[in-house]
Image: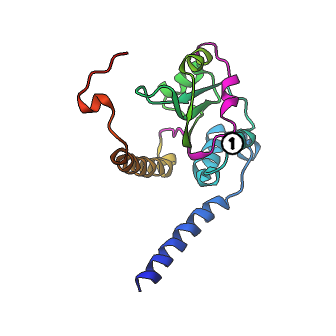
Amino acid sequence: MKKLLLTTIILLAVSSVKAQCNLPYKSLSEFKNDTTAFMLYNFMDRAECYKGKTLKEVRNDLHLPVKWAMSTYNKRRPTISYGISIGILSNKESIEKIRNNKHNNTIYIYWEEAYPINPEEDFDAIKNNNLNYYNIYNNCKIKNIYTTIPEGEKYAKYRKMEEERLKKEDEEAKVKKKSLPPLPEEMGWSVKE
């Protein structure tokens, strides 16, 4: 009985993931050039479709010019990239959209495995608005992908999806933290820079 229940649960989980991945990709023109609808559908509704794929495949689906990209890293471990943020609007345009509670067209991608980076090159690339380093990550495999969610009742479904994703990430982080050895600071040791 337990085996049957477990098998049923696994099949339901796989079919729900597969069902989401069966959603076809839609171009910006299919949304009448509404970038918010385009981003939410392709990178939230279809997020499961990108798991295990590469950044290059996301870029191929994006079909929009990327204005900026930036590594996602932990300040305690700045030599490791956990993902990348991709902006379709310039930083100035993005900040203005955020101030007005609108969608700022940013995609957040997290890797399956951490990727080593040179923090100085990364900071220089950001400062000089150089997207060349963005190409470094083309073959990195994706664990999670999502986009910013605008305010309004119309987008409540996406906020709920985001809450569930964050809850799942918190649970995974707690499990992962238990399996990692503590950092020297966490053990009360002083660390010399």
Q: Position of residue 15 (x, y in %)?
A: 58, 69
Confirm whether the magenta stretch covers residue 132: yes
Q: Residue furthest left?
A: 188
Q: How many numbered marks, from 0 up?
A: 1
Q: Position of residue 13 (x, y in %)?
A: 52, 67
Tell me if 182 is positioned left or right of 168 in this view. Answer: left
Q: Position of residue 64 (x, y in %)?
A: 73, 34
Q: Quadrant of residue 188?
A: top left
Q: Residues within 10 Å of mark 1 (few under 14, many from 20)?
A: some
Residue found 75% across the figure and 45% down from its top: 27
Tell me if 34 is positioned left or right of 71 in this view. Answer: right
Secondary structure under badge 1? helix
Write down the residue under mark 1: 58
Is residue 145 shown above or below 87? below
Which stretch did the figure color magenta? Answer: 127-151
Quadrant occupied by the C terminus: top left
Identify the coloring: rainbow
Q: Residue furthest bottom?
A: 1
Residue found 54% across the figure and 21% down from its top: 119
Residue found 69% across the figure and 40% down from its top: 139
Tell me if 174 is positioned left or right of 3 in this view. Answer: left
Tell me if 189 is positioned left or right of 172 in this view. Answer: left
Confirm whether the magenta stretch covers residue 94: no
| Residue toward you, 112 or 157 | 112
Is residue 128 shown above or below 42? above
Q: Quadrant of residue 2?
A: bottom left
| Residue toward you, 93 or 190 | 190
Q: Position of residue 151 (x, y in %)?
A: 47, 39
Callout 1, which amino acid?
Val
Quadrant occupied by the N terminus: bottom left
